[in-house]
Amino acid sequence: MIASRNLGFVAAAATLLAAAPLSSIFQRWTWLIEAAIAVAVVAGVAALTRLVRAPLWGQVLGMLAGLLLALTWLFPGGTELVAFLPTPATLAHFGELLQGSLQDMRSYGVEVPDTTPLLFITVLGVGSVAIMVDVLAVGLRRPALAGLPMLAIYSVPVAVYVDSVPALPFVVGASGYLWLLVTDNVDRVRRFGRRFTGEGRDVDVWESSPLAAAGRRLAVVGVALAVVLPLAVPGMTGGLLDQVNSTGNGTGNGRPGQGGSPGRIDLFAALSGQLNQSEVAEMVKVTTTESSPFYLRFGVADELRPDGFRVRPPNGRRVDRDLPAPPARQGAEQQRYRATVEVTRNLDMPFVPVYADPVNVDGLSGNWLYDSNLGVVFSRGDNSRGKRYSFEYVRSTFTPSALRRARSLPAEHPIAVQQTRRPAVQQVDLLVSRLVEGKQNDYDKVRAIYDYFSRENGFSYSLSTKGGTSGEEIVDFLTNKVGYCQQYAAAMAWLVRSAGIPARVAFGFTNGTSAGDDTYLLTNRNLHAWTEVYFDQLGWVPFDATPAYAVQGANRSAWAPDSDAPDPEPSETSAPGASPEDPAATAGPDREDAADRDTDAGFDAAGGAPTRRAPSWPWWTAGAVLALIALLCLPALRRMALRRRRHGRPARAVAAVAGGPDVAGGAGADAPGMVVLGADHDRARADAHAAWDELLDTLVDYRVRVDHTETPRATAERLAREAVADDTASAAAVRLLGRAEERARYARDPLTGEPLHRALTTVRGAIAARSDRRTRFLATVLPPSVLLRWRLTVADSSSRLVASGGRTRSRLLRWNPRRLLANRAARRA
């Protein structure tokens, strides 16, 4: 019974550890404190029911009651009895919290604030998982199956997180699951009988068995592989190869950023890749009853991080059913139109383009959903390629006066909380403070920011931009004042958020080329990004800060006119902007010549060639090849250095000897590779050992057998008979090397005055001549003697590390609390 109680508390702790990935969803740790309280209550009730020997169904009922009491105390509705006893009104309050959690899920993106509905559903989920884990691990003694409800917790951040879930929470959760398995198996082994080591020694109560230690090591290795392996495998999210490949320029015929699932698609990369392509590709054909439509949109990025805006996973209802009615926009003129869209095979993504505020959609299956908050139609398993569909939509036209009357959103409004969140950048905040100074309403503040992105302030359009040195991309753009539509849209949205007004980035198509009968052809040149700003009672209002002269099919409006136009007088109704192809629209004293600017078509107007940035993959490839060559050359360089060091010993010895010429049998003092008479005996022995070591390494390199049990003379005689049998000079040379090594080891006086290294060169040449081409190549490029020496060094280091770890573990075991308690109990007995 004690073992079952211990296993129950381990199951509770393992549940909390498995919930660690939820930390990537919440901004704070309030959820963990409240979940720990609920799990502790569930574990305590489970222990009490097992103490009174209640059946399994009684344990389950007790744990459910404990979870209900914990939820009542943590999330009171004001109608409880004695602060933690629920009433029917409390259950109704819980139902309201569940409904509120659904609304918060649609309103917030990760990381979410500590709202009461989201905390309630989190604690309820973790507590329910704790009950299932306890039943499986303790009640049914199937701890391996307890991993399924734990996996359900981990799947939540995986499903909603835009990027890869951090690895550390996964490691913590996996450790909890392994802890539960180990505890159950130890309990089973203890029930079976005594534990002992492979040598037959009993394992004490406080000591872990070798089998358990091996299991822990395997568990650590398994978790490490599960974390590291996905980082290095191409195609897996967050991999190291993805980080390297993300530095490309976005050119080519591929579809960067497209495909995949909504929320993981990189719309910025997709747009950049299409704009940088030299060829024109037809993507969409749209027919609409509206004479002057606004932009056709398909995506929204509304989560702002230090590296820019990201796409948040959408959530919505099926489009083959009735869609929610568009909100009434006070002060805006609304008209209803119908459009038919035909998508070509050049557009392949989990979104389909629609005009803002669609009312109904025909021609799409139930796999397609509509997110009314983002205003996008998406699918989790289908793509837009080849789709043809029709829909009705409501076009809203705003006036500057109506926008000026809009009140600022309260700070606690969900949209204000979510859509004004931004990183703190001092340069941006100072610029926004200067721009909105003295402005009394949100619209005037937005217009001040919008008008800032003008030619008068030095801004221009180009697909080829340059980086900066500030470390912040937003600061670099505001400093260089050169960019394309994504940068203008993201920069304006960032500045508007800094002014405390909700803003986001929208993606879609500008107006295309008319094909007659109210039909427009949209190509990759019409892909565009713009800013949407939220006004109370009016909803999301578009603002396009990109210079109109550079955007094909640009559309300007009364509330967001072209700030670069010579006559900026706005009209009360929106009208399509001037097309770059219209000479009258681009003429004017303040406009640049067409040859001095880049257009959104992706061409250099001066040269007529596509604007391309130099690809970076050749540099990465060349660097990888050079690194591989350097790695392969390391063994050969090490062998050359070792041979040179050994050959240099006699030269230094000669240089150190005082004397004149002809001191070594007629050889001059400058003769290299000679040991002269009168040299120091210790140096002569060192020279003989160096020559012998070089001979042994040469034998290893050319795969000649080396027997370390033989004496030097026996080895030399064997080599003379076998390796160089037909070469008298080589046989004499190898015998000389053997005699020198033998004298250096055993004689009082070493052998001096003999050309050892000349003999070594003769032997090496004879052995190499008798070897095949492959052996000679490996001896030169990958010398086996160097590789063998490295393997032995690694093995020795590993052995020393294992021995050191064993000694450290033995010292630590002396102070093991379990051992001290066991010894104390033995002394009392």
Image (cartoon, rainbow, N blue to C red):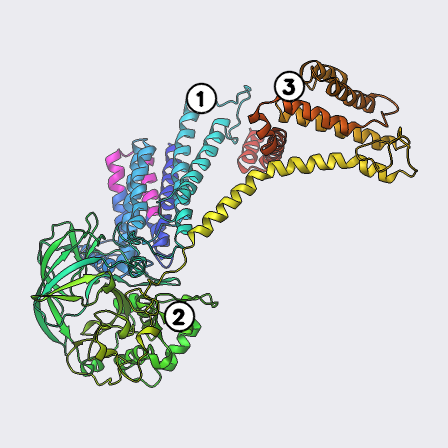
Mark 3 vs mark 2: in front: 3
Residue tagged 2: 477
Residue tagged 1: 193
The reply to whether callout 3 and callout 2 are in contact (CB within 8 Å) is no
**Residue at image x 34%, y 36%?**
51
**Residue at image x 25%, y 37%?**
58
* Quadrant of the rendered image containing residue 532: bottom left
Q: Is residue 70 visible?
A: no
* Quadrant of the rendered image containing residue 113: bottom left
In the rendered image, residue 26 lying in the magenta stretch gets the answer no
Q: In the image, residue 398 lies at what x, y percent?
A: 17, 77
Q: Earlier in the sequence, mark 3 or mark 2?
A: 2
Q: Nearer the viewer, residue 465 or 589?
A: 589
In the rendered image, residue 51 lying in the magenta stretch gets the answer yes
724 over 451 or under it: above or below = above
**Residue at image x 79%, y 27%?**
756
Give the magenta part as a residue range: 39-62
Q: In the image, residue 816 lies at what x, y percent?
A: 56, 37
Q: CA distance from mark 1 to mark 3?
A: 53 Å
